[in-house]
């Protein structure tokens, strides 16, 4: 049984924490990027130390008040907003935003859970190192949340997802106990690895207050290309060739459907289309090498061979940093344009590479029963991760498809799961995909997840209703 924030609870925290720890409840904390959920909050508190986080959680556990951890608010599955809870306490990480230390010789950076992703990247760069986690919301997303959702982004192909970049974690558990796991070891086989339990738990098992992160050498030279491909199948063949030629220096391989740039133009998002007329399919390839690695020449070779074999058409290999930025700007403009056009349904799926082309054909055919729609499939093809988004036909509005969203999503997800894929590749479950997890999840996995949740959080106070359905009572 959960209770809303009460006057007694508020007074207890106000007596124990400085006035600067409290934030006004404003709309910004209650909305999320896709506008699908509107949250509630009885109190917003922004602690400055791990001890203060522990104090808040201990009090919440005693009063059975739900706690919703809050980073930058950019999550796309409604994990950070809670519409259906008794007024919870929102625990903002905004005042725990320091990069504590960069240990360049160890290739390690220690950051607090509220550190902004772009600031973590900049702190690594200042020491001539790379923190490779990168995506569109990096100017607002916070590192504790990035770990809590195990986010992915543009460089997973080479460097892995957030999970692969984390050596140690400090966290506050649902009872208010502090987990001191801020190790910076690459080898540490000392029992259950609680770091990996907390990563991807979306704030339901603990609040990540600090992390030891893995850094890499910065590539001395970078080559970037945008190339027309004949089809998604041809894109996969080019990916195999790129892997063969570039080996581990291949850092991004993005598939872009022509619908993406066409939406950018239609929505008036400022970005150059780079390839005109816009081809039906393109790939964005990035290679980062050590000094004298000549990434431009490697891309030329890849392009030349693929052109001879009829896999690719028009293409641009960036000759300057400005051209490289233009290519990436186009990639980043696509989600912005998608938001303006307004999707009927969006899907963040992953598939075994071998079935992606078959999925594309199957999904288009299956969606035909919903009448005229436009499909914008794009994403991190090197990771088998597609953002497969369905939009109204030209001249129609999202509202014209009201009532169809769930059926569209079921059609796409049934196909994905049937082909051995995942209905959530990198955004998590949040509140949006709780039903999908129940529908497609392995019963043994779900039962184990519930048992873990009950063991760690007996009163069910940490982010209730995210990942696992809120149980009655
Ligand atoms: C334009 C755009 C592009 C994006 N691109 C990508 C992409 O390419 N790849 C990708 O993976 N994601 C992407 N995302 C989503 C991405 O998951 C989030 O941007 C980010 O990782 C979440 O960070 P946040 O600080 O905004 O978290 P929030 O939205 O505040 O929270 C996300 C979840 O984490 C929990 N949480 C927050 N802080 C903590 C903490 N310290 N400890 C425990 N739990 C916590 C919250 O309760 C919530 O469940 C994108 C989002 C946008 C808006």
Image (cartoon, rainbow, N blue to C red):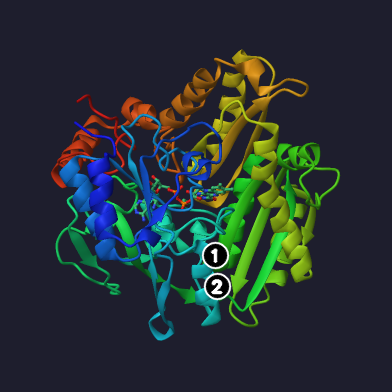
Residue 258 sits in quarter: top right
How many numbered discs, if any? Answer: 2
Residue 185 sits in quarter: bottom left
Residue at 16% from the left image edge and 45% from the top image edge:
62
Mark 2 Cα within 10 Å, few/some/many (few <14, many 20+)? some
Vertically, is 46 above or below 262?
below
Horizontally, is 460 left or right of 213 in the view? left
Q: Are marks 2 and 1 in contact (CB under 8 Å)?
A: yes
Q: Residue furthest right?
A: 277
Foreground residue, 48 or 439? 48
Task: Look at mark 2 in the image and give the residue it sits on.
Answer: 122
SS under mark 2 = helix
Vertically, is 345 above or below 65?
above
Where is residue 14? Give x, y as percent.
Answer: 29, 54
Residue 205 visible within the image: no
- Dividing the image into 4 quarters, which one contains the N terminus? top left
- Dividing the image into 4 quarters, which one contains the C terminus? top left
Horizontally, is 450 left or right of 48 in the view? left
Foreground residue, 454 or 275? 454
> What number is the disc on residue 118?
1
Foreground residue, 256 or 449? 449
């Amino acid at each position: 049984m959960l209770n809303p924030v009460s006057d007694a609870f508020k007074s207890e925290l106000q007596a124990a924490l400085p006035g600067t720890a409290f934030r006004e409840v404003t709309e910004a904390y209650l909305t999320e990027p896709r506008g699908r959920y509107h949250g509630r909050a009885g109190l917003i508190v922004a602690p400055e130390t791990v001890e203060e986080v522990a104090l808040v959680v201990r009090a919440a556990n005693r009063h059975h008040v739900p706690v919703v951890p809050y980073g930058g608010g950019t999550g796309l599955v409604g994990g950070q907003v809670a519409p259906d809870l008794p007024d919870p306490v929102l625990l903002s990480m905004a005042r725990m935003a320091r990069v504590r230390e960069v240990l360049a010789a160890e290739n390690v950076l220690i950051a607090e859970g509220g550190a902004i992703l772009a600031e973590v990247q900049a702190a690594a760069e200042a020491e001539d190192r790379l923190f490779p986690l990168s995506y569109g919301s990096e100017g607002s997303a916070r590192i504790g949340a990035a770990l809590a959702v195990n986010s992915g982004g543009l460089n997973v192909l080479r460097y892995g997802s957030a999970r692969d970049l984390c050596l140690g974690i400090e966290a506050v558990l649902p009872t208010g106990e502090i987990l001191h796991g801020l190790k910076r070891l690459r080898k540490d086989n000392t029992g259950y690895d609680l770091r990996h339990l907390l990563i991807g738990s979306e704030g339901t098992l603990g609040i990540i207050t600090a992390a030891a992160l893995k850094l890499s050498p910065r590539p001395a030279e970078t080559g970037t290309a945008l190339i027309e491909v004949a089809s998604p199948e041809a894109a996969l063949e080019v990916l195999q060739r790129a892997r063969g030629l570039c080996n581990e220096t291949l850092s991004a391989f993005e598939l872009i459907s022509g619908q993406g740039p066409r939406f950018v133009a239609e929505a008036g998002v400022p970005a150059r289309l780079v390839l005109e007329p816009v081809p039906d399919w393109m790939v964005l390839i990035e290679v980062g090498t050590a000094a004298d690695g000549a990434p431009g020449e490697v891309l030329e070779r890849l392009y030349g061979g693929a052109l001879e074999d009829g896999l690719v058409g028009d293409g641009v290999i960036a000759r300057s940093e400005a051209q490289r930025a233009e290519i990436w700007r186009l990639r980043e403009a696509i989600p912005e344009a998608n938001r303006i056009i307004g999707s009927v349904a969006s899907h963040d799926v992953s598939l075994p590479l071998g079935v992606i082309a078959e999925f594309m054909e199957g999904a288009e055919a299956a969606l035909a029963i919903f009448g005229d729609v436009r499909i914008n499939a794009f994403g991190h093809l090197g990771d088998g991760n597609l953002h497969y988004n369905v939009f109204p036909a030209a001249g129609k509005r999202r509202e014209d498809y009201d009532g169809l969203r769930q059926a569209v999503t079921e059609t796409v997800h049934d196909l994905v799961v049937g082909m051995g894929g995942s209905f959530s590749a990198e955004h998590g479950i949040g509140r949006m995909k709780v039903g999908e997890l129940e529908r497609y999840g392995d019963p043994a996995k779900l039962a184990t997840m519930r048992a873990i949740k009950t063991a760690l959080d007996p009163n069910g106070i940490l982010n209730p209703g995210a990942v696992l359905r809120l149980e009655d009572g």
